[in-house]
Amino acid sequence: MKAVAETLGVARSHLHDKVHRLVKPRGPYRKPDDDGLLELVRRLIDERPTYGYRRITALTNRERAKTGEPAINHKRVFRIMRQNSMLLARHTGRRTGRVHDGKVIVMRSNLRWCSDGFEVGCWNGDIIRVAFIIDAHDREIIAWHAVVGSGISGSMIRDMMLEAVESRFGALQSPAPLDG
């Protein structure tokens, strides 16, 4: 063994350990209290099946804080979820459904509306933010809202949508669903 160790340039003790070591297959890493943690993680995932491991970690740590238990690492939750096939499918960036071929034009009005927003910086430092709804057929601006110095809120967008429907259809609801 001495000649082999010298030829390979390794210690004899290393070769001895290699030859006489009992082969012990290493299984998946587990901690003793993983089973209790698995029950909590499974319950949270059943309540919120679209949450990923980081959100589940935050919820798990909130639950554990209520009982005075220490917080756990997100990598541990990831490992537990991976070992039990509870991870979400990876996002590939590919969408299913209608393929956007660059054509937004339609054959008549009120079939498809589009919306967008922009902001304009003024010389005095104010910022004007504008949101609008446009008909994809005739390119007419149906409704718009502008604000100075603040953001466009969700209530402004809802009011703008209601204004657009009222101006086009004279009612609070369109006669047919719009494509958007």
Image (spheres, helix red, strand yellow):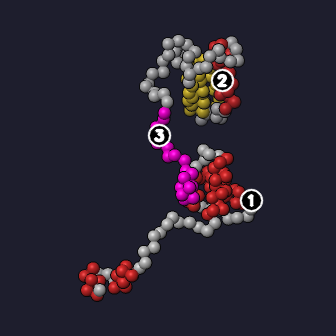
| N-term-proximal mark, 1 vs 2 | 1
| Amino acid type of the residue tagged 3 in the rendering | Gly
**Is residue 46 at all visible to an observer of this figure?**
yes
**Is residue 14 at all visible to an observer of this figure?**
no
| N-term-proximal mark, 2 vs 3 | 3
Report, in whole angstroms, how far the alpha carbon at label 2 lies from the one at label 3.
31 Å
Q: Quadrant of residue 31?
A: bottom right
Q: Residue at x 68, y 16 (%)?
A: 166
Report, in whole angstroms, how far the alpha carbon at label 1 lies from the one at label 2.
44 Å
Rendered view: 140 above or below 31: above
Image-based side of 170 in relation to 92, left or right? right
In this rendered view, identify the residue nearer to me: 96 or 153.
96
Rendered view: 167 above or below 56: above
In this rendered view, identify the residue nearer to me: 139 or 12.
12
Q: Position of residue 106 (x, y in %)?
A: 50, 16
| Amino acid type of the residue tagged 2 in the rendering | Met
- Work out which quarter of the rendered image holds the N terminus and state it: bottom left
Q: State the SS at label 1.
A: helix
Q: Residue at x 59, y 20 (%)?
A: 178
Whether residue 90 appears in magenta in the rendering, the answer is yes
Q: Which residues are magenta?
A: 79-96
Q: State the SS at label 3.
A: loop
Q: Position of residue 148 (x, y in %)?
A: 64, 31
Q: Residue at x 59, y 22 (%)?
A: 133
Q: Which residue is mark 3?
A: 93
| Amino acid type of the residue tagged 1 in the rendering | Lys
Q: Residues within 10 Å of mark 3 (few under 14, many from 20)?
A: few
Q: Residues within 10 Å of mark 1 (few under 14, many from 20)?
A: few
Q: Residue at x 63, y 26 (%)?
A: 146
Q: Which residue is mark 1?
A: 66
Q: Which residue is mark 2?
A: 160
